[in-house]
């Protein structure tokens, strides 16, 4: 498989019991097969414990609004989805194999947003797993603007 963002060959690596594919030495993004992102988040609830030792080359620049193809499916374009409002992370999702591509740093943002949610009972927490939100570029831009204003 090749990186959907910078086209380098992806390297397999283990995160707990989950085998992932990462862009090592390139853009530093990670490919998650269907349900793997949820498994990683469940197995590694502590956002300070790093799960990926991928080398990220800062000279390799990628952009969230680039059109990307699925590394597993032929000729399928990944769709932009917001992981959750709290994380502000825009994922690239395959409508066919349901895999997810996260750019460098996005997994950390997701794990931080999950950890900062108030503690809930197990049953409630399971139901509260955020569902991806399909968004247009227009909405994505508004989310970025809003975040910039909240920070500023
Ligand atoms: Zn890459
Ligand atoms: Zn796919």
Image (cartoon, rainbow, N blue to C red):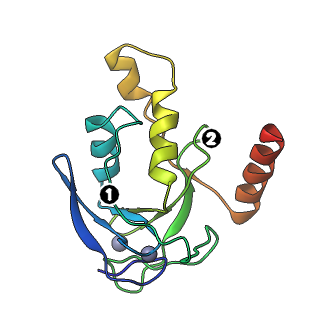
User: Regarding mark 1 in the picture, which secondary structure is present there?
Assistant: loop
Residue 134 versus residue 60 in the image, above or below:
above
Query: Residue 41: which quarter of the image?
Result: top left
Residue 82 visible in rendering: yes
In the image, residue 54 above or below residue 131:
below
Instruction: Please state if 43 lies on the left or on the right of 98 as rendered.
Output: left
Q: Residue at x 60, y 76 (%)?
A: 66
Residue ID for mark 2: 85
- The residue nearer to you, when weighing 28 against 119, is 28
Tell me the quadrant of ligand 2: bottom left
Left or right: residue 72 versus residue 120 is: left
Mark with earlier residue (1, 2): 1
Label 2: few (<14), some or many (≥20) within 10 Å?
Answer: some
Viewer-side residue, 140 vs 131: 140
Q: Which residue is pictured at 50% across the width and 53% down the height?
A: 106
Q: CA distance from mark 1 to mark 2?
A: 27 Å
Residue 90 at x, y percent in the picture: 57, 56
Can you tell me whether the CB of the residue at mark 1 lies under 8 Å from the nearest atom of ligand 1? Answer: no
Q: Residues within 10 Å of mark 1 (few under 14, many from 20)?
A: few
Q: Residue at x 38, y 74 (%)?
A: 25
At x 55%, y 57%, the residue is 81
Q: Is mark 2 within 8 Å of ligand 2?
A: no
- Assign a secondary structure to mark 2: loop
Residue 149, percent across and down? 83, 43
Residue at far left of view:
17
Q: Which mark is residue 103?
A: none
Q: Which residue is mark 1?
A: 53
- Quarter of the image with the N terminus is bottom left
């Amino acid at each position: 498989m090749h990186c959907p963002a910078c086209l380098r060959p992806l390297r397999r690596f283990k995160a707990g019991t989950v085998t992932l594919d990462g862009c090592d030495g390139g853009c530093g993004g990670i490919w998650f097969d269907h349900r793997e992102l949820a498994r990683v988040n469940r197995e590694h609830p502590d956002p300070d414990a790093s799960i990926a030792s991928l080398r990220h080359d800062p000279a390799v620049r990628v952009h969230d609004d680039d059109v990307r193809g699925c590394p597993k499916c032929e000729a399928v374009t990944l769709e932009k989805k917001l992981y959750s409002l709290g994380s502000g992370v825009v994922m690239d999702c395959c409508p066919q194999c349901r895999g997810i591509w996260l750019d460098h740093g996005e997994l950390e943002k997701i794990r931080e947003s999950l950890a900062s949610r108030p503690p809930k009972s197990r049953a409630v927490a399971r139901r509260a797993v955020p569902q991806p939100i399909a968004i247009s570029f227009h909405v994505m831009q508004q989310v970025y603007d809003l975040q910039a204003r909240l920070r500023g």
